[in-house]
Structure formats: C-alpha cells, structure tokens
Amino acid sequence: MDAIKLLKTDHKLVKELLTQLEETSERATKKRATLLHEIQVNLKAHTTIEEEIFYPAFKAAGRKDEAKMYFEALEEHRAAEDLVLPDLLNTDPGSVEFSGRAKVLKELIEHHADEEEKEMFKDAKELLSKEELAELGAQMEARKAEVIASFA
Ligand SMILES: [Fe+2]
Ligand SMILES: [Fe+2]
C-alpha cells in the first residue's frame, strides 16, 4: 500500500477507537481497558513507522518548512505518547477523571492527524514520487507488523 494511504487508514482506525472510548461510561471499565489497549498498540505502531520511516524521508525531501513540520509532529507524538497516554493508562477506568483524560487524548490525536493529512501528506505527495511512496509504504507495512507482534 502507498505510504500515505497506509497512514490515513491508520488515522481512521485510531480515531474510530478514540470515538468509541469517548462514548463509554464509567461503568464500562472492561470495555474501556480493552479499547485503550487497542489504541495503545495501534498508536505505537503508527508513530513508530512515521518516526522511523516516513518523517525522515519527508524531511530529507524538503527544506525549512518541512523540517519545521517534522519537529512539530514529533513534539505532538511526545505529548500524546509520553504524557497523556501514560496518565490515562494509570487512571481508574471507572472514574470521571478517565473520561476527561480520554477526551484530551482524542482531541490531541485528531488535531495531529488532521494537520498531517492537510499539510504534511499533501506536501509529501509533491515532494516524493509515486515509486518512493510505494517503497516507503512497503517498508512501513513490514515494520508495523513487527511492532504489533511485539505487543502479543
Ligand atoms: Fe504523526
Ligand atoms: Fe499520523
């Protein structure tokens, strides 16, 4: 699958899982834990292939604007994965605090994914050839499978 198509498919899945999580109540503790685990795995697989494969190729193909987008995106990954997600994993799923934190994670990821799609991916399509995007996509699919397997 072409790199951009693959990343957009990931966005759609993670956003769907976050919407489902937001719709759960404090009583649905088991469902919350299951959904959160799925979000964690898919998010890790996605940010790994972006950080290891897609972002460096994008940055190398561009100039100053692309470098700025690259660093902004990395910072947003850090905010979601190193701050908000660990907090959420340590929060009682039966609490209202969990609901509030889940909403922040959802908003953060929606903002990040929308910005990637509207700015970075649009730009990447102009900077990288079809062949390059296909090659990156193949590398990313292989790496993604490894990350997902590491959680099993
Ligand atoms: Fe990202
Ligand atoms: Fe992304």
Image (cartoon, rainbow, N blue to C red):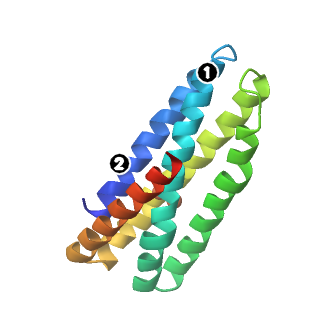
Q: In the rendering, at what x and y percent does residue 39 appear? A: 54, 41
Local SS, label 1: helix
Q: Closer to the observer: label 1 or label 2?
A: 1
Q: Residues within 10 Å of mark 1 (few under 14, many from 20)?
A: few
Marking on residue 30: 1
Image quadrant in which you'd find residue 112: bottom right
Marking on residue 9: 2
Seen as rendered, the residue at the extreme top is: 27
In this view, 105 is above or below 26: below
How far apart, in angstroms, are the residues tagged by discs 1 and 2? 26 Å
Mark 2 or mark 1, which is nearer the start of the sequence?
Answer: 2
In this view, 69 is above or below 32: below
Name the residue rendered at 48%, 42% in the picture: 14
Q: Nearer the viewer, residue 123 or 104?
A: 104
Count of numbered circles on the image = 2
Name the residue rendered at 41%, 78% in the picture: 57
Where does the N terminus fall, quadrant-wise?
bottom left
Image quadrant in which you'd find residue 95: top right
| Pointer 1 residue Cβ closer than 8 Å to ligand 2 | no
Q: In the rendering, at what x and y percent does residue 109 appear? A: 57, 48
Q: In the rendering, at what x and y percent does residue 149 appear? A: 44, 51
Q: Residues within 10 Å of mark 2 (few under 14, many from 20)?
A: few
Q: Is residue 132 left or right of residue 63?
A: left
Q: Is residue 110 visible?
A: no
Q: Amino acid at mark 2?
A: Thr
Name the residue rendered at 64%, 42% in the picture: 105
Q: In the rendering, at what x and y percent does residue 78 appear? A: 66, 60
Q: Nearer the viewer, residue 59 or 27?
A: 27
Q: Is residue 18 left or right of residue 120?
A: right
